Image (tube, grey):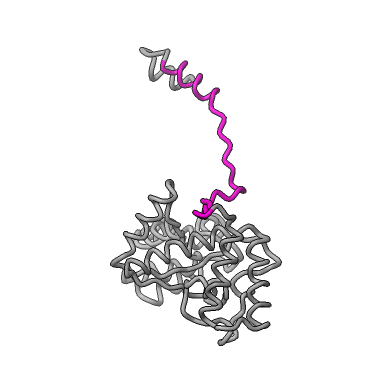
Amino acid sequence: PEQMRSRFSDMPEACDNTLAITERCNVELDLKTRHAPRFKPADGSTAEELLTRLCYERAEQIYGQITGQIKERLDRELDVIESKGFASYFLIVWDFCSYAHKNNIPVGARGSGVGTLVGYCLGLCNVDPVRYDLLFERFMDPQRNEMPDIDIDICQDGRAKIIDYVRQKYGHVAQIITFGTMKARAVIRDICRVLGVPLDEADRLAKLVPDSLGMTLDRALKTEPQLKQAYEQNERTRKVIDICKRLE
């Protein structure tokens, strides 16, 4: 505070007001509660009721007669999904996929999400998990309470239209971002390759980084004298490591 008051000596009230605002701020971020939107059925039913009805209606269309095997699997999946409170999530995905189908936008699930009969009945994919003996548990572990992740590929020509539809329907939404990181030795080799550093020099530099769990370049520079020396005395090495530290 003293430094700021010295810098803004002609406006002491600015520092006073800043401190006053700071003392009034009390922000607590709730990082545990799921803030996913809720799907509200138009007919007034619950998400669980609508999900069950949609699945059984479609199952009859697909299989004709619902056998004991189909019923047992469908009930088991629905029990797990509904008991964990994820019925609304499945309906949200079903809703924008239905919108895509109506607007001739190609969409389809991929990955472990193809292994759910509920998803198949909702039209999220065209692969019958019963016919191909795909495991629902590969997609959603009944013993864990993690949010399911249905990967949906959307045709690039209609992707913006789907995002706009979701935004207009649910309001404040955001796309997921994934940050990838690289291990210290691996990132050195990659950056050396991009910068045209000879392979033997890149390998020698990478091996100066201790092969320890969780090792970072900052820690390696503090614990490995040869690496520190190379960093301080060799301009190219310093350039490589400075770039690497931004990527690891």
Where residue 194 sits, quadrant-wise, is bottom left
Residue 167's x, y, as percent? Answer: 39, 51
Residue 9, percent from left and from top: 39, 14
Residue sitting nearer the eye, 131 or 57: 57
Residue 31 x %, y %: 58, 46
Residue 87 higher or lower than 200, as above or below? above
- In the image, residue 80 above or below residue 167: below
For the residue pair 238 and 40, the one nearer the viewer reads as 40
Q: Is residue 144 left or right of residue 115?
A: right
Q: Determine which quarter of the picture holds residue 59.
A: bottom right
Q: Residue at x 45, y 62 (%)?
A: 95
Residue farthest along the right direction in this orientation:
143
Q: How many marks?
A: 0
In the image, residue 11 lies at what x, y percent?
38, 13
Q: Is residue 191 magenta?
A: no
Which quadrant of the view contains residue 13? Answer: top left
Residue at the image position 50 percent from the left and 75 percent from the top: 111
234 and 159: which one is in front?
159
Q: Identify which residue, 17 or 125, lies in the foreground.
A: 125
What secondary structure is the magenta-colored segment mainly?
loop
Q: Is residue 82 left or right of residue 109?
A: right
Highlighted magenta segment, given as a residue range: 14-43
Q: Is residue 39 magenta?
A: yes
